[in-house]
Image (tube, helix red, strand yellow):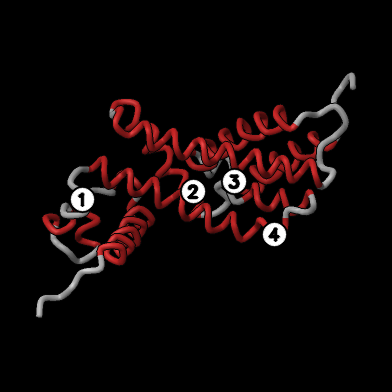
């Protein structure tokens, strides 16, 4: 009897192959050919799942979102204190090789989406999810007493989102100039500022 292929399982195997290529050679090396070789399948077979480079990159972007979601969910139960919220937000900062790789995939996707409008919807979806997650974290921070007098959830969420975007960009592109210790300190300083009363309140 012919072998029955589990498409979801095969896509997971391809995702793992993609991460191995990116981790070893960099996100710029991810292509149908290199991922197919890592997954020990022919480029023709891989194109059955992903017919274009854009589809492969879209898949990589969703894989990033899924990986981050798994880590963040593991922190959700511990957001009853400001310290718990801090640890959750640290999952969105490139503090190790895997998180730097995730940010590299994200940045590559954003750059490509500027000239490939078909990818923008995926980027907007991921951005919306990230914005919602950060707002939820700030709401948890407020509930835990981590927002100072006069500070609004909306304002704190916007500033936290902007800060995390900057940390992600710097940490992914220039990790030697912006090591994890510095990124953590900047995040901690931001949260300490949010805990203080707003000037003039």
The residues tagged by marks 4 and 3 sit, at their Cα atoms, a distance apart of 28 Å
Relative to 183, is 190 on the left or the right? right
Q: Which residue is mark 4?
A: 77
Q: Are marks 3 and 2 in contact (CB under 8 Å)?
A: no
Circle 2 crowding by C-alpha within 10 Å: few under 14, some 14–19, many from 20: many
Query: Where, by quadrant of the figure, is residue 16 drawn?
Result: bottom left
The residues tagged by marks 1 and 2 sit, at their Cα atoms, a distance apart of 22 Å
Question: What kind of element bears circle 4?
Answer: helix
Question: Residue 57, percent across and down?
Answer: 31, 44
Circle 3 crowding by C-alpha within 10 Å: few under 14, some 14–19, many from 20: some
Q: Are marks 3 and 1 in contact (CB under 8 Å)?
A: no
Q: Are marks 4 and 1 in contact (CB under 8 Å)?
A: no
* Residue at image coords 69%, 39%: 186
Give the mark, 3 or 1, whose residue is nearer the N terminus. 1
The residues tagged by marks 4 and 1 sit, at their Cα atoms, a distance apart of 39 Å
**4 or 1: mark nearer the eye:** 4
Q: Quadrant of the C terminus?
A: top right
**4 or 3: mark nearer the eye:** 4
Depth check: give the residue in front, 188 or 150.
Answer: 150
Q: Which residue is mark 1?
A: 32
Relative to 130, is 147 on the left or the right? right
Depth check: give the residue in front, 132 or 58.
Answer: 132
Give the mark, 4 or 3, whose residue is nearer the N terminus. 4
Question: What kind of element bears circle 3?
Answer: loop
Give the mark, 3 or 2, whose residue is nearer the N terminus. 2
Q: Which residue is mark 2?
A: 100
């Amino acid at each position: 009897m012919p072998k029955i292929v589990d498409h979801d399982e095969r896509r997971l195997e391809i995702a793992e192959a993609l991460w191995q290529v990116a981790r070893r050679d960099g996100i710029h090396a991810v292509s149908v050919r290199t991922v197919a070789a890592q997954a020990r399948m022919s480029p023709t077979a891989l194109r059955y799942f992903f017919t274009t480079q854009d589809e492969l990159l879209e898949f990589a972007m969703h894989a990033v979102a899924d990986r981050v979601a798994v880590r963040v969910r593991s922190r959700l139960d511990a957001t009853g204190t400001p310290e718990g919220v801090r640890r959750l937000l640290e999952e969105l900062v490139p503090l190790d090789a895997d998180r730097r790789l995730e940010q590299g995939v994200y940045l590559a996707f954003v750059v490509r989406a500027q000239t490939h409008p078909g990818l923008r919807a995926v980027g907007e979806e991921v951005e919306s999810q990230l914005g919602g997650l950060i707002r939820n974290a700030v709401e948890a921070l407020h509930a835990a007493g981590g927002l100072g007098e006069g500070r609004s959830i909306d304002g704190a969420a916007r500033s936290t989102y902007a800060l995390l975007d900057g940390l992600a960009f710097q940490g992914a592109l220039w990790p030697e100039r912006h090591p994890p210790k510095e990124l953590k300190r900047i995040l901690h300083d931001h949260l300490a500022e949010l805990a203080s009363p707003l000037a003039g309140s």
